[in-house]
Amino acid sequence: MDRVVNFSAGPSAMPLEVLMRAQSELVDTNHAGMSVLEMSHRSKAFEEILSNTKQRLRKLMNIPENYKILFLQGGASLQFSMIPLNLLQKDHEAAYIITGSWSQKALKEAKKVGQTTVAATSEEDQFRQIPDFSQITQSKNLSYVHITGNNTIEGTRFTHLPKTDAPIINDWSSGILSEEINVSDYGMIYAGAQKNLGPSGVTVVIIRDDLIGHAPDGLPTMLNYETHAKADSLYHTPPTFGIYMIGLMLEWIDSLGGVKEIERRNREKASLLYETIDQSTIFHSPVKKEDRSLMNVPFKTDSEETDRAFLHFAASKQLVELKGHRSVGGMRASIYNAMPLEHVERLCEAMREFEETMK
Ligand SMILES: Cc1ncc(COP(=O)(O)O)c(C=O)c1O
């Protein structure tokens, strides 16, 4: 087998064990005599998969009983609309902390629905850091505060939360399960699965019970969280294969020792890569140290030509998908849960070798 080292930002590398397991079960899943791809979403066999996946996520993230776990479609992007449509009350506003392209997109959709306010932004600093949000006031007219917990493109992450009485909503698409958090600090957490959780096509929504059921009359049924909460994500045909794959990913994380151990590994990988960048004479990180992401690591040289030469050099060593996002340039290594330390070591080694060739 000739597998590359894949630093893609999403869809992203999955553990080989998980892929092999899915392969071995593809034609006969859980001894049902049929593939998960062929199962009715109303069958006992699939209901078991759904229920086990949910229970395991609840256990791994320590999700309290007063939160629902929903498996939806439409990506994290549809949540940009569903959140204000369901939660932005009349005569209230929604506050957004703007930390990059994804939070800008979330805000753009909310503006179409109701009143919004930018509570803090680091745009004037090209999103190289998380802005100071200590000024968020306790407004009684705030429906929620939206953050992007990990900024996939810019490579920053929140290390603390705004102090507010309003529910905090976290787009954690590129951070979910990467480190331990206290779910009850949030009103809602959502994530497209295709980075840390499994394949594309499923969005995980973890939402506190009291935030469900306040949507205005006339909201289309499929856009209402209540629809999916009441039907346990089975109002319509859910993304069955994606949910099954998330289940396998969660089993894998559990077998390693849960989120505590995953966080330890993620910190080790990220430290190694940032150390290599910081010690380099040609590569540098554009991101403020305290706000650096554990998952997405952008880095650059001083010239686009050298960046291109490095990408070429890396590809010759089977290190692929390292091109930075088009809005940022340079390189970006996405080192999600599934990426082993050894693959990050190979990248660091290649960076040092490349630097030698430049002398
Ligand atoms: C932080 C963040 N939010 C939202 C999205 C959009 O997700 P989707 O493509 O699932 O709509 C992404 C995708 O990369 C992301 O990284």
Image (spheres, rainbow, N blue to C red):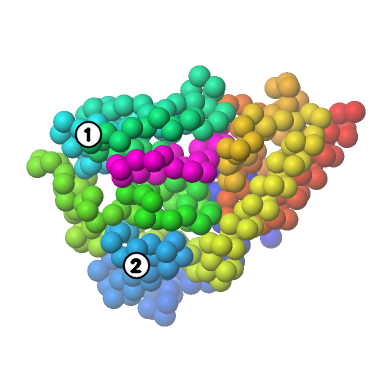
Element marked by disc 2 = helix
Query: Residue at image x 57%, y 37%?
Result: 291
Give the quadrant of the N terminus. bottom right
Percent x, y of residue 8? 58, 43
Which label sits on residue 141?
A: 1
Q: Is residue 322 left or right of residue 255?
A: right
Q: Residues within 10 Å of mark 2 (few under 14, many from 20)?
A: many
Q: Point out the stretch of residues depicted in magenta.
A: 148-171
Q: Nearer the viewer, residue 86 or 12?
A: 86
Residue 311 image-quadrant placement: top right
Q: Nearer the viewer, residue 2 or 178?
A: 178
Which amino acid does the dot numbered 2 rest on? Leu
Q: Is residue 330 left or right of residue 149?
A: right
Which label sits on residue 50?
A: 2
Answer yes or no: is residue 359 visible: yes
Q: Is residue 359 left or right of residue 295?
A: right
Element marked by disc 1 = loop
Q: Is mark 2 within 8 Å of ligand 1?
A: no
| Magenta stretch holds residue 157 | yes
- Which of the two discs, 2 and 1, labels the residue nearer the N terminus? 2
Percent x, y of residue 156? 55, 37
Percent x, y of residue 247? 44, 66
Query: Residue at image x 48%, y 23%?
Result: 123
Q: Nearer the viewer, residue 169 or 35?
A: 169
| Tally of numbered tags | 2
How far apart are the two marked residues, 2 and 1, measured between alpha carbons?
37 Å
Secondary structure of the magenta portion, mostly?
A: loop
